[in-house]
Image: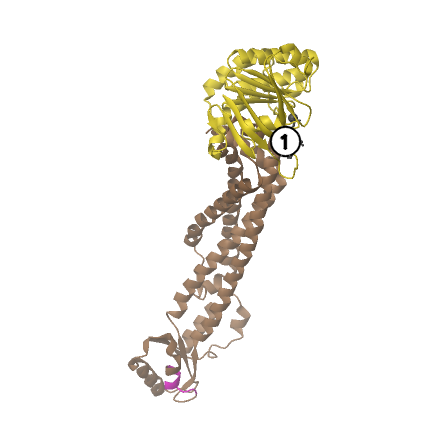
Chain colours: A yellow, B brown
Amino acid sequence: MIELQHVTKLYPASSRPALEDVSTEIDKGEFVFLIGSSGSGKSTFLRLLLKEDDPTKGNVIVNGKTLNTMSKWQVPKLRRTIGCVFQDFRLLRNRTVAQNVAFALEVINKPQRTIKRVVPEVLEMVGLEGKANRLPSELSGGEQQRVAIARAFVNRPLVLLADEPTGNLDPETSEGIMLLLERINRTGTTVVMATHDYHIVDSMRRRVIELNGGVLTRDQSRGVYGVGR
Amino acid sequence: MRVNFVLSEVATGLRRNLTMTVAMILTTAISLGLMGTGLLIAGMISDMKEIYYDKVQVSIFLADDVTDEQRAAIDQQLSGSPEVANHIYESKDEAYARFQQQFSQQPELVQNTPPDALPESFRVELVNPERYSVIAAEFPNGQNGVDQVRDEGDFLDRLFSLLNGARNATIAVAVVQALAALLLISNTIQLAAFNRRNETNIMRLVGASRWYTQLPFILEAALAGLIGALLAIGGLVVTKILFVDKTLAGPIRAGIIPPVDWGAIAFISPVIAAAGVGLAAVAAYVTLRLYVRI
Ligand SMILES: Nc1ncnc2c1ncn2[C@@H]1O[C@H](COP(=O)(O)OP(=O)(O)O)[C@@H](O)[C@H]1O
Ligand SMILES: [Mg+2]
């Protein structure tokens, strides 16, 4: 499903690589935590999976496609199979909840009929059924993140990438978001979540991949945040 | 492609950078207007060449004391000359009538010119306009009733080099303006892309095609180009009505200057529109390629 083969990423004008010789494999339907302190390379890892950036060395394979050799015009097709969620939600402020979710489908040319049907469905799934016509500014942080998750999931991606999705949320709200991501994972969607929230990692007991200064230092199924914790 | 979506994005984009949009439209309009003017002048020059070069190349002005015999002899000599394609005689009265018509805008000049002040003449069309000197040699100045032989072609050459200069200057300014317009378009598109960066970022992440993401910007530029072109065409129409048809009415009626007819404007309008839309769209596309991550 997702494979990194000896991936090194060196940003231009930077002496230390953001990722160094990282190899790993993530199967379909897995739930993986990508942990490590700030600057350890988690976001870079996720960006490479999206082909937002190319590795300096090594291969990245997503959904059976080798990204290195993929041509530019094929990238949109790849991204339609990947959903992403970020710490800062990235909602459009002048659009309502429903419009934000619909936007993701409109711009990939989904028929209006389909949009009318699936947007309420996914809003119900994330627990925002009564709030379809609110603007993001009229929602709490947790609710905004639910909108972002709804938008990422509405096109039923094979993979959901979440870059510190609970980074701006309090622990209770974060728990709700984690339940939602688990639920999405149960539909068969692979979930890769970057975080440094050890409460969450410890309580979920899922596979943990740890990066340390760009180097993969740990890959453990049913892991916890700190070794020996 | 969702037409409504794209159009509403275009409208929002244009409204959001109103000042830039207005500047972009005006610069485009001026550039295209000058380009149109240049094209019209070029058309006019070729019309004038037809009017002038084809008719009169040499004028033989007769002396005041020319006799009927001398006049007939000249006429006969011209008829017999293999160099002459055509010639017509213009009497003092005809010369005066033409003068009156040519300078109908300056009545004082006409009033102050006595009807017999203008010489009678033969207007000669040569088989080969270059062979002026042959004719000049056949009719020496001041002899046999000939006052002066004048090479109108020489005068016309100078006139046309002036007109060509005017055309070239107009087109040069049009090109400079076009450069300014292109830079403004590029700037406006960069600004528009910056204003819409949240939307385009999300579009990129959810896998909208490049084309879908770029189209609103390209259409935005193309629409501004079209509006600029329409303004330019409007400017040409107004110039024709208010300047060419009014101020130049006399010389046009006298056949000195060819009229700018609606056909010419109708002919260059689509050229102007296509240039406006095409250049703006290409400028936008190149800008997006170079400066904007989509
Ligand atoms: N666009 C970039 N250009 C240059 N260096 C970058 C860029 N993005 C990240 N980095 C560097 O790469 C390293 C890893 O960053 P990142 O992947 O964002 O880590 P994390 O998400 O774990 O905090 C950091 O040292 C960061 O400064
Ligand atoms: Mg990060």
Q: Does the magenta stretch include residue B136?
A: yes
Residue segment shown in magenta? B135-141
Residue closest to the far bottom: B143
Between B212 and A12, the residue placed more toward the observer is A12
Residue B110 place in picture, x, y as percent? 51, 72
Judge: label 1 CB < 8 Å from ligand 1.
yes
Is the residue marked by circle 1 packed among few (<14), some (14-19), or many (20+) residues within 10 Å? Answer: many
In the rendered structure, the answer to whether residue A16 lies left or right of residue B171 reads right
Residue visible at 48% across and 68% down in the picture: B161
Residue B56 place in picture, x, y as percent? 39, 73
Q: In which quarter of the image is residue B145?
A: bottom left
Disc 1 is placed on an element classified as loop
Q: Quadrant of residue B121?
A: bottom left
Q: In which quarter of the image is the C terminus of chain B?
A: top right
Residue beneath disc 1: A18
Chain of residue at mark 1 = A
Type of the residue with mark 1: Ala
Q: Is residue A165 magenta?
A: no
* B128, above or below B227, in the image: below
User: In this rendering, does residue B35 appear at all?
Assistant: yes
Residue B245 place in picture, x, y as percent? 49, 57
User: Ligand 2 appears in which quadrant?
Assistant: top right
Between B136 and A109, the residue placed more toward the observer is A109
User: In this rendering, does residue A107 appear at all?
Assistant: no
Residue A136 place in picture, x, y as percent? 64, 20
Residue visible at 50% across and 77% down in the picture: B114
